[in-house]
Image: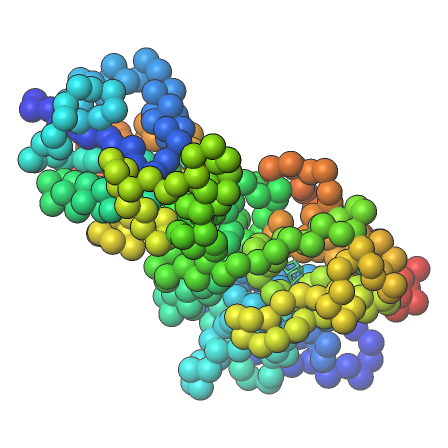
Amino acid sequence: MMTPGTAVKTFTMDGKPFSATEEETILDVARENGIDIPTLCHLEGILPTGQCRLCMVEIQGSGRLVPACATKPEEGMDIITDNPRLRNYRKMIVELLFSERNHICAVCVSNGHCELQSVAQRLGVNHVRFAYLHPRFMLDGSHPKYEVDHNRCILCGRCVRVCEEIEGAHTRDLRNRGIRTMVITDFDTPWGESPTCTGCGKCVHVCPTGALAEKGKSVAEMAKRRHFLPYLAMRRRGGK
Amino acid sequence: MEKLKLATIWLDGCSGCHMSFLDIDERLLALSDRVELVFSPLVDTKDFPEDVDITLVEGALGTEEDLQKIRKIRERTKLLVAFGDCAVTANIPSMRNPFGREEVLKSLYVESDALNPQIPVQSLPELLPHALPLHHYVHVDVFLPGCPPAADTIYQVLSELIEGRIPDVNPLTRFGA
Ligand code: SF4
Ligand code: SF4
Ligand code: SF4
């Protein structure tokens, strides 16, 4: 039900007419209407940041690409969610993610349960055209229950956001810039020594890849559970 | 009908992709009606033949010798298939890449061998600085990811290639499958 006085915007997406309320993003409207736009950093229940750029859509007339998760439709906008240009860029983004770190799917805890892996398959990425960088990363296994393997991190920031916005601990953050960016715990201390982490495991379960995992899981065993997130987000807003 | 010439080779891999190929089981007989296996770890031929129609290459490029082999194979093959994740992404062999060649050799041959610590220089091909996927050195016609690709996938892809069609492998397999 729409509250009286809510401004409604009308626009077209892939040639069809749509309307949206003030709060809704392009991605919200697309998903409500069965239009499938791939995402990696987006997660219902935490703030959208447009970090991964996979959900880029084209605005007709301007040729501009905008992230659907973090852009609200404007009156009269003509949005394209899928065309060869977008598909090409989305493939390139996924290939760049694979080339930036050491993602070796065959020996990953999240093999078969990984969003990067499945988005690659969906977009038809069956090889990587860019040179692999083979950076040298360590694993932090200092926490009694969880571990972080930076080789598999795609810097989506989901863990940072869920820890701050839902758990309220703000244990995680990002350090450095560009491809040198790293997810850190507190002021870059080992996770096991963190005075702020409550050990809730929310970050682990929102992580799209095997970067954050429960200890003791072997290859392909780490399936993530995320259904709690929209519910917790609603409760935090005071919903019942 | 003249049979197509099929070759398979195993570079820097674990032979798992070849094992999966053998898991095609009785359908190998159906394939053998259509193709002649002219070169493979499974047949006793020393030199890679001149005119091969389809070559399945398992494994990454890890040594100078692998490089020489893949260049020759490319010259002599119409359709080159990167067979399995090691060929497609360098996969398991690439786990040495972040450490660099010298450190890996030192750790393996010097630090882990108390009795005779030395890096072998004779009769072993020189290690490349990094293990890399085939397409970083030669043109690849078909990418068949999976570690290993499932027998059904291999059979389907080969059947299509034999019919002269390039199959869409994406619905069939993925990295790490
Ligand atoms: S376990 Fe919970 S409190 Fe600790 S870093 Fe993850 S989300 Fe934050
Ligand atoms: S650790 Fe996981 S959730 Fe956090 S930024 Fe990396 S990939 Fe995203
Ligand atoms: S892809 Fe997997 S099964 Fe095939 S050679 Fe490499 S490690 Fe072995």
The correct choice, above or below, for B20 with respect to B176 in the image is above
> Which color mode does the image show?
rainbow
Instruction: Looking at the picture, tell me which residue is in the foreground, B53 or A136.
Output: A136
Q: Is residue B132 visible?
A: no
**In the image, is B142 to the left or to the right of A185?**
left
Q: Residue at x 48, y 78 (%)?
A: A65
- Name the one closer to the observer, A111 or A12: A111
Give the residue drawn at x 37%, y 61%.
Answer: A131
Residue at 67% over, 42% down? A223
Most distant residue in the front direction = B115
Query: Of residues B127 and A36, which is closer to you in this image?
Result: B127
Q: Quadrant of the N terminus of chain B?
A: top left
Q: Nearer the viewer, residue A37 or A155?
A: A155
Q: Is residue B107 visible?
A: yes
Residue B74, how many percent across, how many down?
Answer: 16, 45
Q: Image point 18% across, 23% down: which residue?
A: B37
Ligand 3 picture quarter: top left
**Quarter occupied by residue A39:** bottom right
Q: Is residue B12 above or below residue B129?
A: above
Q: Is residue A28 above or below residue A139?
A: below
Left-right relation of B14 to B57: right
Q: Position of residue B14 (x, y in %)?
A: 39, 31
Q: Position of residue A109 (x, y in %)?
A: 62, 42
What x and y, as percent, mark residue A22?
72, 80
Looking at the image, residue B124 sits to the left or right of residue B108; the answer is left
> Total marks drawn?
0
